[in-house]
Amino acid sequence: MSDLFKDKSQRREKRTGKVSSEGGHGARGKETTGRTKDSISTVSNIDELAHHDDNARMVVTTENTYQLGPTKRMPVPAVTDILKDVLTSYLQDEKYEVEWSQKMTKTICEVIRARVKELMIPRYKIVVLVHIGQLAGQSMQISSRCLWDAANDTFASFSFKNSSLYGVATVYAVYYE
């Protein structure tokens, strides 16, 4: 493998006009970390692969749309109905357990994201947050911050409660050009 690497690095150096040195990326002497001179730097391999297929890649060109705003906004009532339906169906008869709630938050997030994507809202990135916690007489505040365009970005949220747990789901729709 060492010989193969040396051949590749020599060909690359001939192409670029660089002169080989013993202290380069490819071959190194014995170091304090225990590597031998047969070790290969991953940075050199990545550089080699990046320069090797320049002609084989297809160049994709897109034209400007000059669209400054969304043609269709996220329908907040429809997304709120999705949140209500998913949280109610998944959490209605459940008791709070720590391990279960960790897995369930991921599952609920994926289900909500899939159902919101079915609405086919163009040019929006969808962010879904779900919190599940135990009801034990405590209070809780949830806040989030992000770069927000009040004219184009929007969100929907729904809270669910039963005898042992609560669930809060929020969907953010962030417009991108």
Image (tube, rainbow, N blue to C red):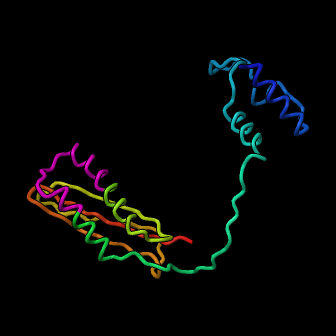
Left or right: residue 11 versus residue 73 is: right
Left or right: residue 29 versus residue 173 is: right
Depicted 17 relative to depicted 118: above or below? above
The C terminus is located in which quarter?
bottom right
Counting from the top left corner in percent of width and height, residue 163 is at 8, 58
Q: Nearer the viewer, residue 139 or 74?
A: 74
Question: Which residue occupies 45% across, 80% down?
Answer: 150
Point out the stretch of residues depicted in magenta: 86-108
Q: Residue furthest left?
A: 163
Left or right: residue 15 versus residue 164 is: right
Question: Which residue occupies 69% across, 30% down?
Answer: 41
Counting from the top left corner in percent of width and height, residue 49 is at 72, 38
Q: Residue 105 colored magenta?
A: yes
Question: Which residue occupies 42% across, 70% down?
Answer: 173
Question: Which residue occupies 53% across, 80% down?
Answer: 69
Counting from the top left corner in percent of width and height, residue 72 is at 45, 78
Left or right: residue 140 versus residue 11 is: left
Q: Quadrant of residue 118?
A: bottom left
The N terminus is located in which quarter?
top right
Q: Residue 130 colored magenta?
A: no
Q: How many marks?
A: 0
Q: Quadrant of residue 62?
A: bottom right
Counting from the top left corner in percent of width and height, residue 85 is at 22, 65
Q: Nearer the viewer, residue 120 or 77?
A: 120
Secondary structure, magenta segment, majority class: helix
